[in-house]
Amino acid sequence: SFHQEDEYEFRIQNNELESMRKSCYSPTIFSTKLLMRIFSQDELLDVYISSLNQKQNNKYSIDEIRLNYIKDMVRKYYVNYFNNQNKKKSFDYVWNACTRAIN
């Protein structure tokens, strides 16, 4: 449907994502830059990252569709980060660090 297409208009071209990834030395910086790219400053004023769609400390949960997009892009562009046995950091561990950085 037309509405579904509109929901994903925030998606970024692969070449821009790749360039963004090359300029970021960690998934936390990448996720923060991506957040700033696909959300307006006004949208970010009173939100926090949560899986619950409710108010907390007068803040609202961030748009889950775009947040999941950021999560998917972190997983896609930092796959070697998680597969490197020397790092031994799970995706969940790194994603939690990303959400702390975003908040």
Image (cartoon, rainbow, N blue to C red):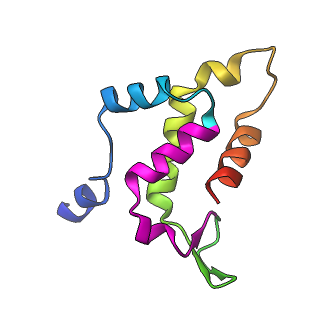
Magenta highlight on residue 1: no
Direction from residue 31 to residue 5 in the image, left or right: left
Q: Where 87 falls versus 94 (above or below)?
A: above
Q: Nearer the viewer, residue 70 or 45?
A: 45
Direction from residue 81 to residue 45 in the image, left or right: left
Q: Where 91 falls versus 23 (above or below)?
A: below
Look at the image and tell me in which quarter the C terminus lies: bottom right
Identify which residue is drawn at 49% across, 67% down: 44
The x and y percentages for residue 32 are 55, 47
Number of labels in the image equals 0
Identify which residue is drawn at 76% across, 32% down: 90
Look at the image and tell me in which quarter the N terminus lies: bottom left
State the image quarter where residue 24 is shown.
top right
Q: Main secondary structure of the magenta part?
A: helix
The x and y percentages for residue 13 are 29, 35
Q: Which residues are magenta?
A: 28-49
Q: Where 70 falls versus 88 (above or below)?
A: below
Magenta highlight on residue 44: yes
Identify which residue is drawn at 39% across, 32% down: 17
Identify which residue is drawn at 31% across, 26% down: 15
The x and y percentages for residue 84 are 72, 15
